[in-house]
Amino acid sequence: MPDAAAPGSTTTAASSGMAAVDGHWGSLAATPPMGWNSWNQVHEAVTEDVVIAAAEAMVSRGLVDAGYEYVVVDDCWQSAERTPEGLLLPNPGRFPRGMKAVADHVHSLGLKFGMYSAPGERTCAGRLGSSGHEERDASMFAEWGVDFLKYDWCGAGPLTPESVRPAFERMRDPLVATGRDIVYSVSEYGVARPWEWGRGTAHLWRTTFDIWPHWGSVFALLNQQWAACAGSGPGGWADPDMLQVGNGTLTPEENRSHMALWALLPAPLFAGNDLAAASDDVVRLLTHPGLIAVNQDPLGRRARLVAVTPEVMVWARELAGGDLVLGVLNHTEGPVEAAVPLVQAGVVGRCTAVDVFSGRELGEPGVGYKAVLERHDTAVLRFNRVPSRP
């Protein structure tokens, strides 16, 4: 049986939550959320020190100025057991000051604080989940100052819309009822077609299994997005998982492609590397103003896969104000010089082009453009319409 509601919570969460879903709660995440998440950096070894260091590095290295704002503690923050009253507390060895103190520190830096739980009895790493305790946990998260909740399916039952969606709604409704602005991110790995029901259930819905820090994983997840991004837009975003930029075996070109294509999709941008130790090149890539502007474009229109040639894959996305942006990915195992099918990609009429990475103006491309790309690299081109002559 679920625990009785904690002080400050409500026993009518479902009714009040449903009434608010299409109101203020539904207006959160107008653009894809940006931040840092602990999992890709440290996996199960998350601690208070790791989280605070990431938050401080977000400020000192310019990520906050670029738009990153959430600091999210992923799995393994929990203690081994709930209290006799049913409270879920942090592991005292990992978070000795408690989660509210960490949240307060994050907030003092001008950032927002996020946490992790699961709809089953256990999380992906075998820690305590929120099953049967949704109202109590939601109230506790709000009291701690949580601004973002990642809710991960792992072991909660069969992965079907009939079981997944109600389980996610059982946490959504008490989150709404707290009255706190908590962005809600759900993950069932795209198995139960969340693009068909995610909007209104959550602000973010995962479309893939976990990303790994090598090109095979990044490219495989990208290839799933041409259909899985359906339904994505302001207030609700398809999530192909967090960034691995700067991690593992990714080359500089693969890092560029990963960041560029996640920006173009547009995906939530959650760094998962050691921000304090990252190279200047990685930080410049994570904070690239041209890519961030594309990702955060207020129109929120999803990218479309418009062309695949033996050398390149072309993604296109319309932006507010009428601009068109293309991502041209070299998907081969060597350098290429490839013709980009501009008309097929939607570039029609007189346009001027800008190379987003360099900021270099390319002039009017006419009907053709040649992309010169190293292995697994991506060019990002932004086309501006030229006014007709009188």
Image (tube, rainbow, N blue to C red):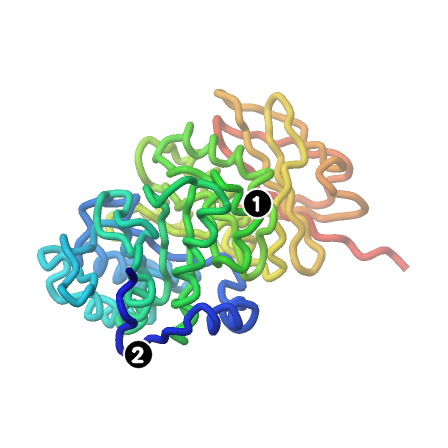
336 over 218 or under it: above or below:
above
Q: Is residue 108 visible?
A: no
Q: Nearer the viewer, residue 97 or 362?
A: 97
Residue 229 numbered mark, or none: 1
Quick one: label 2, few (<14), some, or many (20+) residues within 10 Å?
Answer: few
Mark 1 vs mark 2, CA separation in Å: 37 Å
Q: Quadrant of residue 22?
A: bottom right
Residue at image coords 71%, 38%: 345
Q: Quarter of the image containing the N terminus?
A: bottom left
Q: Quarter of the image containing the C terminus?
A: bottom right
Q: Nearer the viewer, residue 206 or 41?
A: 206
Amino acid residing under circle 1: Cys
User: Is label 1 or label 2 in front?
Assistant: 2
Residue 389 numbered mark, or none: none
Q: Nearer the viewer, residue 31 or 204?
A: 204
Q: SS class of the residue under badge 2? A: loop
Mark 2 — residue?
Answer: 8
Residue at image coords 69%, 60%: 321
User: Seen in the image, is 351 located left or right of residue 14?
Assistant: right
Q: Quadrant of residue 115?
A: bottom left
Residue 151 x/y as whole percent: 36, 53
Single out the residue that lies furthest toward the bottom: 8
Q: Quadrant of residue 253?
A: top left
77 over 188 or under it: above or below:
below
